[in-house]
Image (spheres, helix red, strand yellow):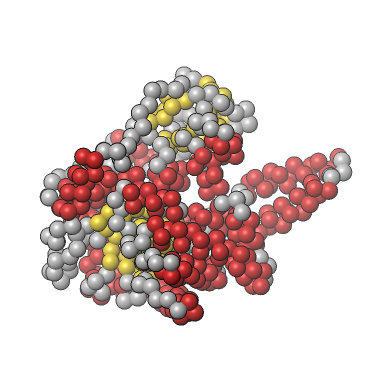
Amino acid sequence: MLAFDADLAEAWGKAGKAVILLRPETKPDDVHGMVAAKGILTARGGATSHAAVVARQFGIPAVCGADALQIDLVARIVSTDKHSLKEGDLVSIDGAKGEAMVGAIPMVAPKYEDQPDLVTLLGWADEISARKTRKDAKDRPTRGLQVWANADYPKDAVRARAFGAQGIGLCRTEHMFFEEVRLPIVQRMILATDEAERQAALDDLLPFQRSDFEGIFKAMTGLPVIIRLIDPPLHEFLPAQEDLIERVTELHTKRNYTVLNVSEQHELEYKEGLLVSVHKMHEQNPMMGLRGIRLGIMLPGLIDMQVRAIFEAACDAKQQGFEPMPEVMIPLTGHVNELKMVQPKLEEIAKQVMAAKGVQVKYKFGTMIEVPRAALTAKAIAGVATFFSFGTNDLTQMTYGYSRDDAEKDFLLKYVEDGILPSNPFQKLDQDGVGQLIEIAVTQGRLARPDLEVGICGEHGGEPSSVAFCYRAGLNYVSCSPFRVPVARLAAAHAALGLAVN
Ligand code: PEP
Ligand code: MG
């Protein structure tokens, strides 16, 4: 049944109802409703929009960018030229085909674990793709292409391992910040007016991060886990500016003809203050603004806390007999000097934690390659980073200059229909353009550091033709949603056998 907002989707989901969350588009603070829903339907967005990425991550079917839908969030009605439905009405979606249907259709649940033939076949696939058939930049044989998974929570890591993932290629730490108890602490940290206040909030966040990381390390014992430090712009953790303006105006208007009660008066004061902060943080192009490593440089306490949490968790897991293999990933590097400023300090924290705990764990520090300049200057960057992971969602966005959040709602799909583009570059890697940057970065990076570990963690990591490209480009692994791991394992073997994949 249709729910028009995340809170209702969560409430109905918890009550055992099969909910399809319908939104114009989703935002990070909708995640609690998304995970409680059986499906997600959005009018805007595309293959790498927030709704698609989160849905893929959690294995929830999603249809994103159904622009025929006209959603009236006030009347709680959605209409097309043929239908008009209200909240609570039944719809079904097919995420593979991108279709939404009125009513409930018969469905079959796919299973992986109960299919021994499939498990055997994929075991053969892994053996084939692990063969040492490729050469690196110095003409030496390299390890075969592995399949890792993107997983943010311990339960996703368990699922990834069950699907045959040989590592975690991306743990997006910020997703953990949106949970109920944590979000107010994160907001306190962002809105802090002095360092002591900010540090107090960071100290409160640390145990949450530590316990999530410990769970992931335990689930993935003996296998590498790449944990990415904070990436999104901080305004994503605060209420939207428009919503604040609406509520503040409403309360002001009310105050003009009546006396506000005490809680309304407090709300007005709080939201007026919040509005000033949100306004100050507003950016015209947040995707190209204060995010990734830039945020780490401007707010060092935040990433220091994250690294401390990672190593405390790793040491604790090791003391309990597990074998954690943390790899700390710094996002959105564009210039080697950014890494030179950030990475040594973080490595120092890692060493301090291990010394204090009296435990040593194997670890790596590396970076995402998501900005074209980083790919072109990979040799210098590999002088500092010990691994690269291609964030091809952002790399595609920045190479083409197409917004990953907006392009699919208008011109991009027409470009594909009209044959201007052979396919949607946010789904299938653009091998000629983005691929060339990847090849340059792999070659240049391994010139500086022959044993540089290189992988991909954008949405392309689970798409067969992109997996084949990654094999040819000499990557060590592809990382994708746990649910796409079986397909990626097969695609990696096809690539190793030289079979054409489209
Ligand atoms: C990417 O850009 O490809 C990536 C994995 O990071 P995110 O999607 O979180 O920006
Ligand atoms: Mg990215």
Is residue 217 shown left or right of residue 242?
Answer: left
Quadrant for the C terminus, please. Answer: top left
Question: From this viewpoint, is residue 456 visible?
Answer: no
What x and y, as percent, mark residue 247?
Answer: 71, 44
- Compared to residue 433, the image places residue 346 above or below, namely below
Residue at figure coordinates x 46%, y 43% from the top left? 51
- Compared to residue 51, the image places residue 337 above or below, namely below
Q: Nearer the viewer, residue 113 or 209?
A: 113
Q: Nearer the viewer, residue 25 or 317?
A: 317
Q: Nearer the viewer, residue 88 or 277?
A: 88
Question: Which residue of the protein is positioned furthest toward the top in this rendering?
Answer: 82
Q: Quadrant of residue 350?
A: bottom left
Question: From this viewpoint, is residue 47 visible?
Answer: yes
- Compared to residue 39, the image places residue 236 above or below, namely below
What x and y, as percent, mark residue 245?
Answer: 68, 47
Is residue 312 shown left or right of residue 382?
Answer: right
Residue at figure coordinates x 41%, y 60% from the top left? 218
What x and y, as percent, mark residue 157?
Answer: 39, 53
- Compared to residue 39, the image places residue 168 above or below, namely below
Residue at figure coordinates x 55%, y 60% from the top left? 208
Tag count in the figure?
0
Q: Quadrant of residue 227?
A: bottom left
What x and y, as percent, mark residue 225?
Answer: 37, 62
Q: Quadrant of residue 273?
A: bottom right
Residue at figure coordinates x 42%, y 44% from the top left? 58
